Amino acid sequence: MRDLPHSLIPLKNSGPASPYPPRLGVVVVGAGYWGPNLARNFQRSEEWDLRAICDLDVERAEGLARQHGVASFGSLDEALDTLDFEAVAIATPARTHHGVALTALGAGKHVLVEKPLADHWDKGAAMVATAEENGLILMADHTYCYTPAVQKMRELLLEDELGDILYIDSVRINLGLIQPDVDVFWDLAPHDLSILDYILPGGLAPDTVSAHGADPLGTGRDCVGHLSFDLPFGAMAHIHVNWLSPTKIRQMVIGGTRRTLVWDDLNPQQRLSVYDRGVQLPHRSPRAGAERREAAVSYRLGDTWSPALPEREALGQMVAEFASSIRGERPAATSGAAALRVLGVLEATSRSLQSGGAQAAVNPADGLGLEEQFGAGLMDRGVLRQEAEA
């Protein structure tokens, strides 16, 4: 603990020990778009004690800090020199994540980072390695993974309710803010990629991706995009992202051999629908060639049902997960290594775009896996791209 003025040193409690663990102190870095949401949920949580807000825009930091009755600083370094706390939550532009995170990790603080983990895979890998080497938690704020709907989707897939996956089709379009530093893939696709990494039993592990983008407004970055990659057993995933659509759609369709799952995030009355309908193939057929293809396909028309979902704020669940992982109760579902898998796909997407949509390998660090570079401790949920099982 740093030396504090005598008036700020807490008095020892002579009464009985509290049955509840002490709250964890956290500092939020970034008071722009996402920082206020993080600050609000940390303040509401019984697990956390919001200590301060940091932002280069001191007036903006002061304004948000006043709302929550906490200190404000113009930099994380000032907060580190002044306060005692356990964790840092970063809500700044992606290009700054690496530097801020390494500063916090170097000071012995656990770190939460909003998506994407970093603006380059090697920077993200350095963040993951530093956290691992120092025995600290690095977690990504992949908020959708903590929504009741996505958690139910994961449950259904892990219980094999859909059967073998045949395809995944995801659409995330809206009349959105054109970002100054990233294209539409880096802005919107991390949501869908992190969801797939969370719900698929093997995680996000494509060998290659193919991406096509367009910049019809001449902004200098793609505003409309399509991303495709293979899934196991000949299945395919497709993600459509768009900043220019006048209508807002957030929908994912997962087709399986048993059932099809539809997630419509903008339909609060029925966010999830499970269809017992689809194409059905016989297990065996004596026919061959065109005759077999013609005879093999039939259609199943069954019931449709909608799972009941609890109502709770995803960010509240996310900050609780951060506290639990720090206390060693369970690994973070959206760990730094999980975020790095998403980052690897995003970088491959950019390489595919640069080559006119040709397939690009998801091949971080010129083929070297995280285990080979930084140690086996980084390889949560199996291995990045399941290399250890190959």
Image: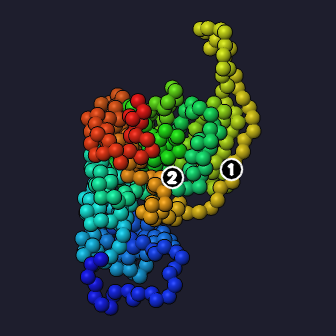
As shown in the figure, which amino acid type bears the numbered disc 2? Cys
> Which mark, residue 315?
none
Residue 227's quadrant in the figure? top left
As shown in the figure, which amino acid type bears the numbered disc 1? Pro
Secondary element at image label 1: loop
- The image position of residue 28, as x and y in percent, is 37, 69
Q: Which residue is mark 2?
A: 145
Label 2 and label 1: CA atoms lie apart by 17 Å
- The image position of residue 53, as x and y in percent, is 35, 73
Looking at the image, residue 67 sits to the left or right of residue 233; the answer is left
Residue at 54% x, 76% y: name it: 19
Residue 341 visible, this orientation: yes
Image vertical order of residue 268 relative to residue 15, above or below: above
Nearest the viewer among 355 and 19 is 19
Q: Which residue is mark 1?
A: 307
Check the picture and name the quadrant holding the N terminus.
bottom left
Label 2 or label 1, whichever comes before in sequence order? 2
Residue 72's quadrant in the figure? bottom left
Looking at the image, residue 228 sits to the left or right of residue 152; the answer is left
Residue 351 visible, this orientation: no
**Mark 2 in CB contact with mark 1 (< 8 angstroms):** no
Image vertical order of residue 202 relative to residue 333, above or below: above
Query: Mark 1, residues whose alpha carbon is within 10 Å: few (<14), some, or many (≥20)?
Result: few
Residue at 66% x, 13% y: name it: 285
Looking at the image, residue 254 sits to the left or right of residue 215; the answer is right
Residue at 38% x, 59% y: name it: 137
Secondary element at image label 2: helix
Check the picture and name the quadrant holding the C terminus.
top left
- The image position of residue 192, as x and y in percent, is 47, 45
Residue at 27% x, 42% y: name it: 373
Image vertical order of residue 61 relative to residue 361, above or below: below
Query: Mark 2, residues whose alpha carbon is within 10 Å: few (<14), some, or many (≥20)?
Result: many
